[in-house]
Amino acid sequence: MSANVYLSFLLLLSLFVSCNEAESARSTADTSLGEYTDQIELEPPRSAEPPPPREAAREAKIIKQGALSLDVDTLSKAKIQLDGIVTRFGAYYENEAYRSDYRANHFDLSMRVPVGQFDSVVTALESGPGKLTAKKISARDVTEEFVDLEIRLENKLAYLTQYQEILTGARTIEEVLQVQEKIRALEEEIESRKGRLRYLESQVRYSKLQVTLTEYVAAEPESGPGLATRLGDAVAGGGALFVSLFVSLVYLWPLLLLGVLVGIGVFWRRRRSKRRS
């Protein structure tokens, strides 16, 4: 009887120890899982490589620029004709500047033209207010840069959404500060890429055209000096010549003095010779 009781006691003790070990293992596993969750919680899952741009949806982005120089007969009339061209094709002046020199008067005009009307405006200017003297047209394809910026912007927006979700589940002040710093950096990058996209879009939609109008000024014929002017110049020239001679004689006073002394000596010698004879 006592042996059966002893065996029952050993069986219960072994069951109790087994339950404690299982509970301890489960607690350790939960703790490890929690630490692992804390480690990955502040980093959003990395998305797969961005999908390649769809060729069907890609639209060519071309930036056109040009510069024209025109010689005109009357600057004001040419400017009025140019204003009519600008209004007709939906363009506008970005900058106007007037300058003048001794040879000509100039209007430097910076225009923004809808890309669909660019060629029409250039044609109208070539046959319009004056004679074309210089022309330069350029086009730059920014499609690849545009698509790359759009893809990067989409990825940054996705990361921003993930970090905002992580912020709602942050448990400590340190976690909140870390997530907020990442959100701030992402928002700065997003605004920078949005600004670049807006700039490229404006350059694509409105082409820049620089137009210079030049009106040459006729040179006035030069007239010769009158009689009074010539007489005055002659009197002034004669007076200057007299002063120059007088100054030159002053510079030669030693020679003049020597000549006077020699002349006096010759005169006395001749006079004495006459008295003796």
Image (cartoon, rainbow, N blue to C red):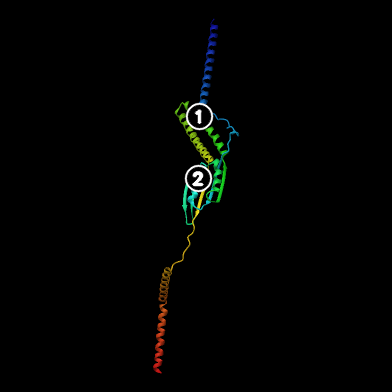
Across and down, in percent, residue 166 comes to 49, 27
Find numbered disc 2 in the image and state the secondary structure of the residue it sits on.
Answer: helix
Q: Which of 62 and 249 is in front in this view?
A: 62
Q: Nearer the viewer, residue 6 or 95?
A: 95
Task: Identify the residue under disc 2.
Answer: 84
Toward the top, the furthest residue is 1
Labels 1 and 2: the sequence-earlier one: 2
Can you say which quadrant of the picture contains the C terminus? bottom left
* Left or right: 247, with 45 as reference point: left
Position above or below: 192 against 253: above
Say which quarter of the image contains residue 248: bottom left
Q: Which amino acid does label 1 sit on?
A: Thr
The crowd level at tag 2 (other Cα within 10 Å; few <14, some 14-19, many 20+) is few
Q: Which mark is residue 161?
A: 1
The crowd level at tag 1 (other Cα within 10 Å; few <14, some 14-19, many 20+) is few
Q: What residue type is labelled 2?
A: Gly
Toward the bottom, the furthest residue is 277
Position above or below: 29 against 137: above
* Left or right: 83, with 247 as reference point: right
Q: Nearer the viewer, residue 227 or 250?
A: 227
Across and down, in percent, residue 213 comes to 51, 50
User: Rounded to the nearest whole Å, what is the CA distance between mark 1 and mark 2?
Assistant: 51 Å
